[in-house]
Image (spheres, helix red, strand yellow):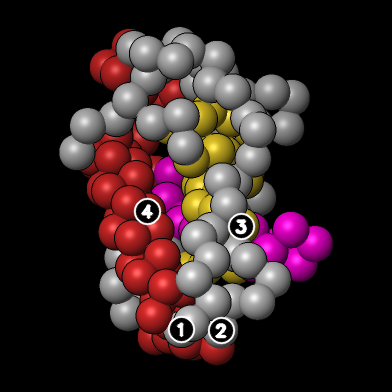
Amino acid sequence: MATREDYNAFLETVRKQTGLTMLVPDGFGLSNLCVQDEYNTHIQFVEATGKILCFVELFSLPKDAGKVVYRDLLVGTLFGVDSAGGYFSLEPETETVIYNYLFDFDKVAANPDEFISTFENIISLMDIWKDRIREKLSSDGSGAAPAASGDYQSPSSDFIIQA
């Protein structure tokens, strides 16, 4: 079973390959970064399961978002429609849409390029979902655009993943 030391060594490899120097886990194995100055992204190793949890704050929905938006997110989560194996959750206080994805640590540790590629694809997927939900919000009559996910500032404003 993989340990935190294994995870730290894996992240060191990812940092070397990507230049993401801020990808350093805290005492709980959690790393935070802001991608494209837009997506608060959190990556955490869960030693008990051997998984890496990646969750991305997409944006906060307006309070009057219509059922068409929630239906689309639910279908994506329950049936995997256009979610690439991840699922959506909703933070109840801020109504922030969060995309969650689980990496198998052993699999990505054996091939860090797969982790990097999948991570880049997740960010591309977030761009697609952001546009998709904005379109649904404008077509449901609310006309409200989703709010940014937070005021988090990237430690390095140079960091932009290109898909």
Sequence-first tag of 3 and 1: 3
As measured in the structure, the alpha-carbon distance from the residue carrying label 4 to the one carrying label 2 is 20 Å
Q: Position of residue 66 (x, y in %)?
A: 56, 84
Q: Residue at x 29, y 35 (%)?
A: 116
Query: In this orientation, which residue lies closer to the viewer: 6 or 60?
Result: 60
Nearer to us: label 3 or label 4: 3
Give the labeled residue for mark 2: 66
Q: Evaluate if marks 3 and 1 touch, with contact meaning CB atoms under 8 Å apart.
A: no
For badge 3, the amino acid type reads Ser
Q: Where is residue 122 in the image (x, y as percent from the top left)?
A: 34, 50
In which quadrant will I find the C terminus? top left
In the rendered image, the vertical position of residue 69 relative to residue 16, given as above or below: below
As measured in the structure, the alpha-carbon distance from the residue carrying label 3 to the one carrying label 2 is 14 Å
Give the labeled residue for mark 1: 140
Q: Residue at x 29, y 72 (%)?
A: 82
For badge 1, the amino acid type reads Asp
Circle 1 SS class: loop
Q: Where is residue 23 in the image (x, y as percent from the top left)?
A: 50, 21
Circle 2 SS class: loop
Q: Evaluate if marks 1 and 2 touch, with contact meaning CB atoms under 8 Å apart.
A: yes
Q: Residues within 10 Å of mark 3 (few under 14, many from 20)?
A: many
In the rendered image, the vertical position of residue 92 relative to residue 32, given as above or below: below
In which quadrant will I find the N terminus? top right
Determine which of the numbered discs, if any, sits on residue 15 in the image: none
Q: Can residue 107 be seen in this view?
A: no
Query: In this orientation, which residue lies closer to the viewer: 10 or 69?
Result: 69
Nearer to us: label 3 or label 1: 1
Give the labeled residue for mark 3: 60
